[in-house]
């Protein structure tokens, strides 16, 4: 438990992944028995799917894939994974995500897989950022729908993140 009390907000992505895995083994039952967390996890799953559906419908996924394949894409480049903390990785484990052991491509984000991001719960910059090239290709109405879906996703993710931190703080005081 002493290693689990030291929450990796900085450090290597491998340290953060290890902390999240150990925490998931230790706390998953405790956390998921909390009604608020269970509800937030279910809501987050729905909102993630709504955001991804809006990305597909607006052509964002196709545009990003084309950029990645033809131009070497830079949005999901190596180093972006440093934005992730242990809590966000713990949330991914709670959502059933299998965190990678190693980086797939040397110039890509640690969490980038062959089919895109391997995470469900993503950092705000990974959710919100769209380059000008992509926004120029997306119809304004589609972009508005996407931003609305992303806002709901981020709101629930923030509430879940804060609830987990609160419960773990309370648990460590016992």
Image (tube, rainbow, N blue to C red):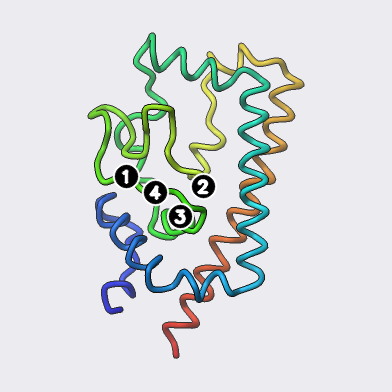
> Which residue sits furthest bottom?
174
Disc 2 crowd, CA 10 A, few/some/many (<14, 14-19, 20+): many
Q: CA distance from mark 3 to mark 2?
A: 7 Å
The quarter of the picture where the C terminus appears is bottom left
Q: Which residue is mark 1?
A: 100
As drawn, the label of residue 98 is 4
Residue 149 x, y percent position in the rendering: 69, 38
Residue at position x 37%, y 32% in the image = 113
For label 4, the SS is loop
Distance, label 1 to label 4, CA atoms, is: 6 Å
Image x and y of residue 11, in percent: 26, 55
Instruction: Give the residue pinned by disc 2.
Output: 121
* Rendered residue at 31%/63% (across/down): 19
N-terminal of the two: label 1 or label 3? 3
Contact? badges 3 and 2 (CB < 8 Å): yes
Query: Which of marks 1 and 2 precedes in the sequence?
Result: 1
Vertical arrangement, residue 154 with respect to residue 53, above or below: below
Viewer-side residue, 25 vs 57 = 25
Q: Quadrant of residue 82?
A: top left
In this view, the mark in front (1 or 3): 1
Residue denoted by label 3: 88
In this picture, residue 163 sits left or right of residue 47: left
Element type at marker 3?
helix
Q: Nearer the viewer, residue 22 or 16?
A: 22
Tell me if residue 170 comes above or below residue 125 in the rendering.
below
Dot 1 falls on a residue whose secondary structure is loop
Label 2 to label 4, Cα distance in Å? 12 Å
How many residues crowd mark 3 within 10 Å: few (<14), some (14–19), many (20+)? many
| Cα distance in 3D space between marks 2 and 1 | 14 Å
Q: Are marks 1 and 4 in contact (CB under 8 Å)?
A: yes
């Amino acid at each position: 438990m002493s290693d689990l009390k030291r929450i990796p907000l900085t450090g290597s992505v491998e340290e953060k992944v290890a902390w999240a895995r150990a925490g998931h083994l230790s706390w998953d039952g405790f956390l998921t028995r909390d009604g608020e967390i269970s509800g937030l996890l279910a809501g987050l799953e729905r909102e993630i799917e709504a955001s991804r559906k809006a990305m597909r419908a607006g052509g964002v996924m196709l545009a990003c894939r084309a950029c990645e394949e033809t131009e070497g894409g830079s949005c999901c480049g190596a180093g972006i994974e440093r934005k992730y903390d242990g809590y966000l990785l713990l949330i991914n484990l709670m959502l059933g995500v299998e965190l990678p052991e190693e980086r797939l491509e040397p110039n890509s984000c640690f969490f980038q897989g062959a089919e895109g991001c391997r995470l469900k719960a993503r950092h705000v910059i990974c959710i919100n950022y769209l380059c000008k090239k992509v926004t120029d290709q997306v119809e304004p109405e589609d972009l508005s729908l996407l931003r609305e879906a992303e806002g709901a996703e981020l709101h629930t993710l923030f509430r879940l993140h804060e609830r987990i931190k609160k419960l773990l703080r309370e648990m460590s005081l016992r």
